[in-house]
Each structure stands twice: as structure tokens, then as C-alpha cells.
Image: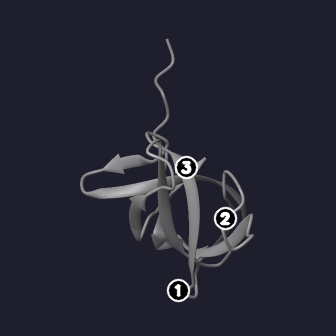
Amino acid sequence: MILLKCDKVTRGLRASEETAVVSDAYGVPDFIRVEQGFLSQRGMDRYLPVSLIDREGTLLLVEFPQESERGNNRVWVRAEQVVEKPRRASA
């Protein structure tokens, strides 16, 4: 699991939701509705957890946790748009 940096986060349609705005490698925005608390935060930046599917050079194919409002499940993003999700310490 990796984290995709959100361009912006807005209120969702319901009080319990947020909409994460993320861009693909070509700058095209996608909108993904998630429950509040689902996004990760590092400093002032918010991140959407995504799955890494494939890599081609500096491009990564990632899978969203659910279909975006544009109907995408997977998009290509630039490597600099993602960070590793911290692993939990094992007991």
C-alpha cells in the first residue's frame, strides 16, 4: 500500500464524507469520495491510500480504493506524487 498525494480535499455530499481530488500523471483531476478519517495526513498534506499495480520508469499504475467520479479504478501517476505508507511495528 502506498499513499497518493491529494491536490485538494473538499467536503463530501454528506457530513461524514470528504472528496479527495488527485491528478494523474498528465494533470487530469479525479474525484474520489471517502469517509472522513480515511485519508492520511503528513504535515499539511493529505494522502489517499492506493495499491501499486505496475511501474514503468517514473510512472506508477495505482488502483483507487473505489471507483472515482470519472469512472476510473486505475490511473498512471508520477513517482513523486506518492509516498510509502508507514508499516506498523510488530510485537
Above/below status of 10 relative to 35: below
Instruction: Residue 27: give its label.
Output: 1
Callout 2 touching callout 1 (CB < 8 Å): no
Which mark sits nearer the N-terminus, 2 or 3? 3
Read off the residue under disc 3: 34
Does residue 15 appear in the picture of this structure? yes
Q: Is residue 14 above or below residue 29?
A: above
The label on residue 68 is 2
- Residue extending farthest bottom: 26
Identified by mark 3, the residue type is Val
Q: Secondary structure at mark 3?
A: strand
Q: CA distance from mark 2 to mark 3?
A: 10 Å
The amino acid type found where label 2 is placed reads Ser
Residue 25 spot, x, y in % from top left:
58, 82
**Residue 39, position in %: x, y?**
46, 47
Q: Quadrant of residue 64?
A: bottom right
Tell me, yes or no, whether the two marked residues, 2 and 3, touch with CB atoms within 8 Å. Answer: no
